Amino acid sequence: MVLKTIDLFAGVGGIRLGFEKAGFKTVFANDFERKCKETYDLNFPKPKLLVEDIWKVDIDTLPKFDILLGGFPCQAFSIAGYRKGFKDKYKGNLFFRIAEILERKRPKALLLENVKNLKGHDGGKTFDIIKKTLRGFGYHIKYEILNSTTHGNMPQNRERIFIVGFLSEKSYKKFTFPKEIKLTRNFRQFTSNEAEDKYYYNDKPLYERIKNDIDSELTVYQWRRKYVRANKKGVCPTLTANMGLGGHNVPIIKNHKGIRKLTPKECFLLQGFPRKFKLPPLSDNVLYHQAGNSVTVPVVARIAKEIKKALKG
């Protein structure tokens, strides 16, 4: 029997990709961002992405599913956000819509993803509410912070918290998060030797301020408004949704032609999206935002395999 999932706060389908790699079938997908639909529908024939406020989605019309997936908006819980947590009437309270769906539909399992800081937000009170809510509906939960470098073999320093829950205590006891694996890949495997001129800083005003600090082709850099920051571990720094806000957070590399920022396609590749994943003709800012707002696919795929083993036992 094929296990079915619903993809909430789906973005461009990163979590879906991970679960489908593990053999799950997606039966419903929803997000509020209209531009996500262009990217999502270009890559997934069905179901198409329903662009709708999740509060307006009729829970009774949801198709039957086994696992709820949700990379629910992290702004309300992020250090980079407004620190409002559940007081944020729009983004924070969306967790309670997930809870309502869980209460009504009773799927076998769930996977929620968020920023690392969710665990410590408001002195841990926010996360305590999440845990108590899920447990109150009968879900046995485990959670862990995983890094894309150590758990996805992807050269991107990206820490995210994953919450996995099961109705069955037997499945819960069988589930374990994937173990750390060795990083064997280099960021150069995901970047091209050539890129369009628009990505290069060579003839732009910023070039004079960064040219002396960006001197290695083996390092990924960031321009931090006033100074250049080198990622000492030789991997890409965290790709963020803010890359789409002016582009100043887009990582920078050096090659034979000069100094340039990563392209949107390279950002998707560093999130573990397959090379065949198609990007629609949207602005670079939108595509940077979509890449940074997604998940590292291989990390999710490894979690999905463990969920499948726990459920099938």
Image (spheres, rainbow, N blue to C red):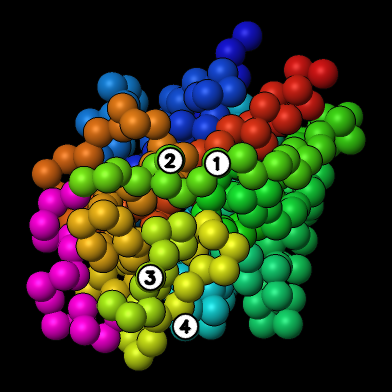
Residue 165 within the segment the image draws in magenta: no
Q: Which residue is mark 1?
A: 185
Residue type marked 2: Gln
- Horizontal placement of 266 versus 236: left or right? left
Whether residue 9 is visible here, answered yes or no, is: no
Q: Residues within 10 Å of mark 4 (few under 14, many from 20)?
A: few
Q: Position of residue 48 (x, y in %)?
A: 29, 30
53 and 217: which is toward the camera: 217
The disc placed on residue 82 is 4
Tell me the SS state at disc 3: loop
Q: Which residue is mark 3?
A: 215
Q: How many residues crowd mark 2 within 10 Å: few (<14), some (14–19), many (20+)?
A: few
Residue beneath the point at 22% across and 74% down:
246
- Name the secondary structure under disc 4: loop
Residues drawn in magenta: 195-210
Task: Say above or below: 107 vs 248.
Answer: above
Asked if residue 204 lies in the magenta stretch, the reply is yes
